[in-house]
Amino acid sequence: MSRQLRSPASRRSPVRLLIGLVAAAGLLFPQGAAHAAPYRAPGDDKIAKAVATDLKDGKATFFVRLAGEANVSAARRAATKQAKGRAVYAAKTAHANRSQARLRKLLTERKAAFTPFWIANIVKVTADPGLATEIAALPEVTAIEPIEKADPPKPRPGKARAKIDAAEWNIDRIGAPQVWTDLKNLGEGVVVGIMDSGVDIEHPDLAGQYRGTRADGYMDHDYNWTAPEGMCPSAAPCDPHYHGTHVTGTIVGKSGIGVAPGAKWIAAGGCCDESALLAGGQWMLAPTDVNGQNPRPDLAPDIINNSWGGKGYKDTYETMVSAWVDAGIFPMFAIGNDGPACGTAHSPGMFTESYASGAFGADNAAASFSSRGAGENGELKPNISAPGDGIRSSIPEGGYKTISGTSMASPHVAATVVLMLSAAPSLRGDVAAVRALLDSTAIDGDDTTCGGTSQDNNIYGEGRLDAYAAVQAAPDDPLGTLSGTVTSTIGVPVTEADVTVTGPLGRTAASGGQGAYSVRRLPPGTYQVTASRFGYSPTTTSVTIVAGQTTTADLALTLRPHAPVSGTISVAGVPEKGATVKVAGTTAEAVTDAAGHYQLGLPHGSYRLEVSASSRCVGTASEQITVAGSVTKNVDLQVRHDTFGYTCTSGTEPYVAGTQRLTQIDTKQVEELTLPFPVPLYGTARSDLWVSARGFASFIEPDVPDNEPLPNPGLPNLAVYPFWENIWVDAQAGVYTATVGTAPHRSFVIEWRNVTFNDGNDRRLSFSVLLGEDGTIGYRYKDIDAWRDQGLSATIGLENQDGSDAFEYSYNARVISEGRSLTFTAPAVPRRTRP
């Protein structure tokens, strides 16, 4: 697990989310008379002190734990991974529905916000003190607990090393290239799940291995990606950090950075809130569509990599890990970065049922930062060690970075399991057998400092990972190959067709040059083979795979009739150049010319056109069409505005810098100013302003929280957000102010100059806000050259006094470019000056 950084306190709001245990505080209920025992309502002893303390402020969000767990014995008797997964899902959901029924009914009647979980018998609830007392009084409720947070990862710097025959040193060290060349195994046919900060779906070394990527490049996110609401700007995977992208690269990345570049990945973003992790772990066992509906345990991954954790025991996670194992999913964890002291193993990696990796470096010595065991009940921990010191892998924006941590070690082991399952499909779902093979083929590391023997100890575990030996030791399953060609009915090769194989084992492939495809290592049996491509009618055939032989199945697709779809896109009646027209569910799209005109060619059928302008100052539109001949569809987009009436324009106005440096913001994070003139915002003009190091300024004294979507009732409010992010004003940076222009059109300038990010990122940018005495608000940007600078984890916009109205230009979206300017204009209404 990589070095870690705790996030700053969450944004305060009337409904506060508890993160971690707070100090013990007084009881929720008042004390009785002197010499009398304090009054305790029925069930009050079930409410954790941290929750009771938080309830004093009003509503709180917490976990309600209920008695009992599901009987999953049917899963343990099941013979296949799919059967195991279905049995666990059926038992867990049925038990949750029964045991949580009365609580859910109460919460529904009280109109309380709640989220039930089934992977653990827990319900997330937002409630006031009275409702919390009612919940605690239910006999099936065993505890009301705070929602904790695992440590978000903070990678350590790493030393770059030369590649070895086009592979990174760490990939070569475990013998992965030998598996590729000698055993002809890239990990095909296996799916790995990533629970982390997210994944950059656009990285060229990762995009093709996403399970949702079709042969023609279209990406289907149903059952392949999930994240907390608002984390990403669209339904597609994203990574506001970069940790998850780095981890994923080590597992499936191309260009020599990944152990199993032929495997597929799916992911759950949102590390590391306990609620998000529990939701992600539940989704992994039974993935859902993008709306969180229609769970499919048959689409669960074979392995889940977890490069996160924290100190101390947490039985919520142990219940989750046990469910994965019962479902035949291999649970891979990082052991932590609190070495070299003994007894520093992190949870969940320390659990008996978790398989956890420590880290070693290029010298084969255990990394000093790698946590040491023992684990739960004296269990040998880590279980194994893998390269984790100086690991080069992918980061967002198509980049690469060398970092260190057991977060970097864990994916090596996860990917080795991928190679093992690809070589021997009979191992799928047999977690114990996979563990035994990893253990028996590891290279011993002799260090008994923290207990154990020279062969098995709490520094290296069973030893250093040897992927080549582990794959060679896997069962020699009888396997066959399927190959063929996809053509049109007139014999023209069809490239980028999706080939789906279903039967004893499910697999996918894509037709390449000349329409050829190949699927290797299929267990013998009868399969259905389907070829499909947008614009063609799909076709299916049946084949029988024989061990040691290649079976040929050629498929012919029928081209569907096509017709033109065209029209004009305008904004408030004016033709819009550069607007995008996309056809939902396909890769078809067009961009309008100077006259706002677009044209597409589509096969006959029904479609949804998704239309957007070149600027987020303009709204989007969705139009349904049916194509049976030529279609003309004109769309008039509307200028966006908030309830108050603010609108915006996007342009390239000159950058405006400050001249007077603020002296306290570097250390205090917030500095109070008195403006030289009142500035109107949402109808009231004020002169008192608080400037935050985090890229915003507020006319109400703010907290300094992480960025969130707008509007939000919690502080900050009555604020301008040119780039609200986790920014650091270090010695190379500064915040400057100036006054420009002449009355009555003066502007007060606040410039965040050469600032960087507070998580070890080495990128820098500058931006400024112009607060106009005439009510206009301007934002300017420069030194914008990468994904983070473009706003991938920033909030940009305006917000009113109580957080009930806002103009959110963007939230966690890459929308800012070099030289970009935004100007927000208020409607012509009388303004009031604050007394």
Image: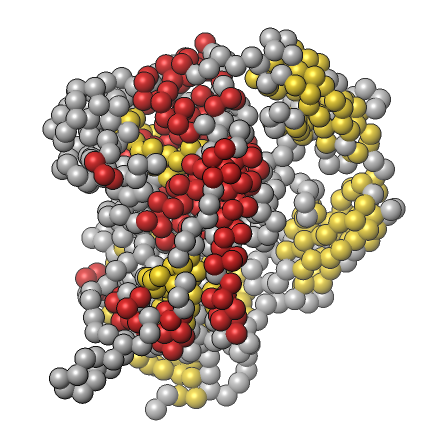
Q: Quadrant of the N terminus?
A: top left
Left or right position of 33 against 112: left
Front in this rendered view, residue 208 or 501: 501
Image position of 523 (left or right of 386):
right
Q: Is residue 136 above or below residue 151?
A: below
Q: Is residue 92 above or below residue 76?
A: below
Residue 530 in view here: yes
Picture quadrant of residue 589: top right
User: Percent from the top left, x then y, of residue 289?
Assistant: 59, 48
* Residue at x 55%, y 76% (from the top left corner): 643
Compared with 810, 397 (above or below) is: above
Residue 703 visible in the snapshot: no
Q: Residue at x 65, y 33 (%)?
A: 216
Pick whichever, 772 or 181, lies toward us. Answer: 181
Total numbered badges shown on the rendered structure? 0
Tell me: 329 left or right of 24.
right
Q: Position of residue 494 (x, y in %)?
A: 73, 25
Instruction: Pick the residue in front: 404 or 444.
Output: 444
Quarter-wise, where is residue 168 in the image? top left
What residue is shown at x 74% (from left), y 22% (from top)? 542
Q: Position of residue 339 (x, y in %)?
A: 17, 37
Q: Nearer the viewer, residue 520 or 424?
A: 424
